[in-house]
Image: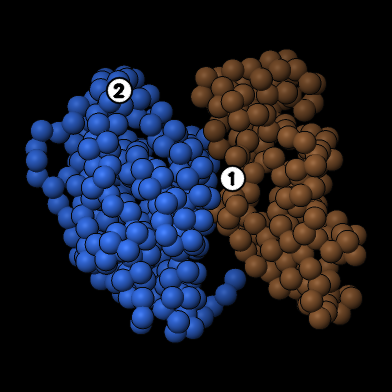
Chain colours: A blue, B brown
Amino acid sequence: MKNQNLYNYIISIADNSLILAQRLGELCGHGPTLETDIAGTNISLDLIGQTRNYYQYAAKIQGEGKTEDDLAFLRLEREYKNVLLVEQPNDHFGYVMGRQYLFDVFHLLFMTEMLNSKDETLAAIAKKGIKEVSYHKRFSGDWIKRLGDGTEESNAKMQEAIDDLWVYTDELFDITEADAAMISEGIGVDTSKFKELYYTEILALLTEANLTIPESKYFTRGGKKGIHSEHMGYILSDLQYMQRTYPNMEW
Amino acid sequence: MSKGFKMITTLANIDQHLLPILEQVSDPEIPVLSVLDLGVIREAVEVDGVIKVKLTPTYSGCPAMDVIGDDLQAAFKPLGKTVEVDLILSPAWSTDWISEAGLQKMEAYGIARPLSETADKDVLLNNAKKVVCPQCKSTNTHLVSQFGSTACKALFKCDDCQEPFDYFKCLK
């Protein structure tokens, strides 16, 4: 493939959206209230829409006649390059909103930078997606505040989620070989530019929500290199079941 | 927003003879709106018997786009013409592209029309009472849910006539 780095770069961004969308999709019909249920699936739908745009583009670059569906459903676990944060389970609603917020803040900063990409398709996807992502952040941020600044129990559960999810935040800023190559060509987003801003923004909201940032400096990583947590296999067995069982099936 | 701008961004790039047929293709989620009312057809031209359409999605994941593509095929089939749909993302769709006629049909259908960008933020962030109830025209309304039955809408309730209703969110 001529543009291997560009392909790898797009896949890695797309996989973040796909896997987070799949996690939110699991909540369909199981949300704590009707409004949060609808919100979860709406956010999931936005992310799937963005994923489709990325995969369609990646399939074109790959040039093997594959489609967006092949990329979504027929890769092996190691070939998915999403960060570990997005594959973490839904445990309780605090985890769902915590995971969402920690990703949304990153996602919005990322898309804002991607508007300036020299790659026209990526810039267009950002221009479309940025409005959706800012709405997601508003929703998840509101819930962090409501739960953190709510009852003793909701505060404890929200803090538990933040404490557990915190170790996955540093990986968002890892720069792979493909990332570095794309940054040098003015196509990729240099995430180091807004790493400080990311943590400052989160600290401000958590403080407002009577929550604290874990003191530990230990962070875990691997997803961007295809080395996932134990949850990923279960996600993929759900996600890929129909295509693996009935190859080429269509609705 | 002047009507002149809308003409430039939408209808100018559409072959006049295709308009009557495009007018019959509706948004599957809001069936009173045609794809022209909605402003999602950015270009439609006939080249050697093939209708080439440039379609822009309202939201990235809007499932209506696939259906609209199929409906366009079906609409031109009786004329023996095929349609090639090209999905374009930039410039991104805006609620400003919905025609005035479309906005009126939307309200009659029971969906409140999008407010200006500033008023929209005021409503969704600060619970301001600005959205007009499509049933009784009161602005004594409040936000029930930031997300609604489709990606483009939020759920509201009127505190005068007590009816719940959809609000079409402003997107720019």
The image quadrant of residue A153 is top left
Nearer to the camera, A238 or B120 = B120
Mark 1 nearby-residue class (10 Å; few <14, some 14–19, many ≥20): many
Element on which disc 2 rests: loop
Kind of residue indicated by mark 1: Ala
Mark 2 nearby-residue class (10 Å; few <14, some 14–19, many ≥20): many
Q: Which residue has dot 2 on it?
A: A209
| Residue B76, visible in the rendered structure | yes
State which quarter of the image contains the C terminus of chain A.
bottom right
Element on which disc 1 rests: loop
Residue at the limit of the structure toward the bottom, as seen here: A64
Can you give x and y, in whole percent of width and height, for residue B93 in the image?
63, 49
Chain at numbered mark 2 = A
Can you give x and y, in whole percent of width and height, for residue A145 in the image?
35, 25
On the picture, is B46 further left or further right than A186?
A: right
Figure check: A1 above or below B115: below
Q: Which residue has dot 1 on it?
A: B151
Kind of residue indicated by mark 2: Ala
On the picture, is B8 further left or further right than A185?
A: right
Q: Residue at x 88, y 61 (%)?
A: B16
